Image: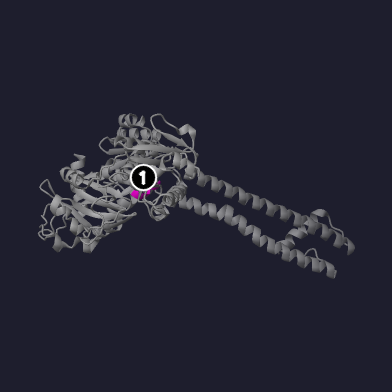
């Protein structure tokens, strides 16, 4: 199975192929216009042939009747008859001539009813309507707009970012250079405006001086230009830029970017973290609000077959169990949840508590753990660096020889070839990471690897959110989406680390304690029953209380640390609409200062 060359832009698009949605749309439009012109030329050709043929027949029939007319008159009679004008100054006297007149009239009328409307609609009406729509694409934002996000691209990452902004009631605007694309985005109900990204006037029209942040997620040179332009006209506005090359980080910072994120490296590191934490050893996948969010595998430990109530991790070690992963399916922790060999715990704890957990449950392994990384692009290399730092051995399966890099073991060949995977150490591997850019390829390889080894931990990459569930069905234990990882990284800079993406569709987030819950105990608030979210910690007066007791009274000015799916988080915002907005305003002021 061929792997896709993975030199990506900010939205994960393959740049080596030279494909871009704007250029593709314009190419389709040009091809459609050529097809229409060809149709018109064919119709005109048929029309000229009909006029010529009818004129010749007219000339011959008139000669038989003893009437003589010039060829110009023949064409004149044919056209007036075909168009149903019929002046009556030239008529046939024979039945054959009159029958011919009927044929000319009917065929001409039918043909002109097809040709004339087609030409009018395609070359007059539709272009007029298109131009009218083009003029409707906004070219400036209202003067009252403020506190908004200014986006310079609309790829998978930005789609996810717009969704977050909409749910959080944060205004935004997407700047698009192509008018037709702007019209399309406008019709989809998104806030968009037309403007050149290298023109300062564009950003003035976008009210950038009143914005909260400008997000530049195009290629590195374009991002540098955007950062420099915005920093010149709005020096107090935060600028976040993505960097595809590590060498571009310094350049973007010099150009004026306040934050530079390398989204591919973030994805690689996150995928690597999902392969660790096996055999009872906890592995931190995120640090949030002073708590460590970690995963720990149950395989080969004394936890197999026991319920969470029997383990009593909170009572004995102070560890809060957020939930349990089971072959990609996540369930909120419940006392009667029974752990199986394939279960993976998701916990929230302090460093000391995790060390106590490891001391009790970690299973020693005589041999170093090994991982197979499928795909030697930037994501695959980032995973290799992260695994190497943890002391794991790994091999990268790559189809293209020119992508081999020093300092890592490469196996060149097709990942769908069993012999290639065997050479890479699949038989002794504890994990396989599927990292290609093509979701179809990732589904194929995930299913293949699951069929070869039922006990493998498989971590797969998804470019688009809609393919996440398919990858889980194919056998992945964990799936990370480039768009969700990227949008979360950007959102955290914007919101001040308000959200931690634990896995695709599962987040840990902050919220001010809703005023209607202040003074009640956690048990009385029924947060889980009302929203589907689970409270994992309470912060008050700068202190974090992890794994809170159900009888803990919620303080007035405190904050909740909550875990929930995207749907549960949305339900929380609907049930307590003012809580998350209050914490956003509070943290945004601190972040800007």
Badge 1 density bin: few <14, some 14–19, many ≥20, Cα 10 Å: many
Colour theme: one colour
Q: Nearer the viewer, residue 21 or 403?
A: 403
Q: In which quarter of the image is the C terminus?
A: top left
Q: What stretch is highlighted in magenta?
A: 155-160
The answer to whether 62 is drawn above or below residue 313 in the figure is: below
Residue 397 visible, this angle: yes
Residue 216 visible, this angle: no
Q: Is the magenta stretch mostly helix, strand or loop?
A: helix
For numbered disc 1, what is the local secondary structure? strand
- Looking at the image, residue 250 sits to the left or right of residue 413; the answer is left
Question: Seen from this angle, which residue lies furthest front?
Answer: 366
Q: Which residue is drawn at 17% across and 50% down?
A: 319
Quadrant assignment, res 281: top left
Q: Which of 586 and 39 is in front in this view?
A: 586
- Label 1: which residue? 431
- Looking at the image, residue 49 sits to the left or right of residue 428; the answer is right
């Amino acid at each position: 199975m061929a792997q896709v060359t993975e030199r990506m832009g900010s939205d994960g698009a393959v740049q080596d192929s030279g494909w871009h949605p704007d250029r593709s749309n314009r190419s389709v439009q040009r091809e459609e216009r050529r097809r229409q012109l060809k149709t018109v030329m064919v119709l005109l050709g048929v029309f000229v042939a009909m006029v010529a043929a009818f004129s010749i027949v007219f000339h011959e029939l008139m000669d038989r009747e003893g009437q003589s007319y010039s060829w110009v008159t023949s064409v004149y009679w044919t056209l007036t008859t075909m168009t149903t004008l019929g002046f009556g100054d030239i008529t046939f006297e024979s039945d054959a001539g009159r029958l011919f007149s009927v044929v000319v009239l009917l065929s001409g009328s039918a043909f002109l009813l097809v040709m004339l409307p087609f030409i009018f609609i395609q070359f007059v009406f539709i272009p007029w309507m298109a131009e009218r729509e083009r003029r409707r694409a906004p070219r400036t934002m209202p003067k009252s707009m403020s506190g908004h996000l200014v986006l310079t691209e609309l790829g998978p990452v930005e789609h996810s970012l717009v969704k977050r902004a909409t749910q959080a009631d944060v205004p935004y605007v997407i700047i698009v250079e192509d008018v037709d694309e702007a019209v399309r985005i406008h019709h989809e109900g998104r806030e968009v405006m037309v403007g050149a990204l290298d023109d300062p006037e564009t950003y003035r029209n976008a009210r950038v001086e009143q914005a909260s942040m400008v997000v530049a997620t195009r290629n590195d040179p374009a991002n540098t230009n955007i950062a420099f332009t915005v920093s010149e006209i709005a020096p107090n506005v935060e600028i976040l830029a993505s960097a595809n090359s590590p060498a571009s980080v310094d350049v973007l910072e010099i150009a004026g970017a306040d934050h530079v994120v390398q989204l591919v490296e973030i994805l690689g590191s996150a995928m690597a973290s999902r392969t660790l934490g096996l055999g009872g050893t906890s592995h931190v996948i995120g640090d949030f609000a002073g708590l460590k969010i970690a995963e720990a595998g149950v395989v080969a430990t004394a936890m197999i077959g026991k319920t969470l109530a029997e383990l009593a991790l909170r009572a004995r070690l102070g560890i809060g169990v957020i939930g349990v992963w089971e072959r990609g399916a996540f369930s909120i922790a419940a006392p009667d949840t029974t752990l199986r060999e394939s279960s993976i715990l998701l916990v929230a704890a302090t460093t000391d508590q995790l060390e106590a957990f490891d001391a009790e449950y970690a299973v020693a392994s005589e041999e170093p753990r090994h991982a197979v990384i499928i795909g030697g692009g930037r994501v695959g290399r980032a995973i290799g660096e992260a695994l190497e730092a943890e002391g794991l051995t790994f091999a990268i399966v790559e189809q293209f020889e020119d992508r081999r890099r020093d300092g890592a073991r490469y196996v060149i060949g097709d990942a769908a070839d069993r012999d290639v995977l065997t050479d890479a150490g699949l038989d002794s591997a504890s994990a396989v990471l599927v990292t290609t850019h093509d979701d179809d390829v990732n589904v194929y390889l995930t299913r293949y690897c699951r069929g070869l080894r039922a006990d493998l931990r498989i971590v797969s990459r998804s470019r688009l959110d809609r393919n996440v569930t398919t990858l889980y069905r194919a056998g992945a234990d964990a799936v990370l989406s480039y768009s969700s990882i990227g949008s979360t990284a950007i959102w955290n800079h914007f919101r001040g680390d308000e959200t931690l993406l634990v896995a695709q569709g599962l987040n840990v987030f902050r919220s001010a304690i809703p005023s209607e819950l202040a003074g009640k105990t956690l048990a009385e608030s029924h947060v889980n029953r009302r929203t589907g979210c689970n409270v994992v910690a309470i912060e008050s007066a700068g202190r974090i209380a992890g794994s809170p007791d159900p009888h803990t009274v919620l303080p007035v000015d405190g904050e909740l640390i909550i875990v929930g799916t995207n749907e549960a988080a949305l339900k929380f915002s609907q049930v307590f609409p003012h809580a998350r907005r209050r914490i956003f305003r509070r943290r945004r002021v601190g972040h800007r200062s």
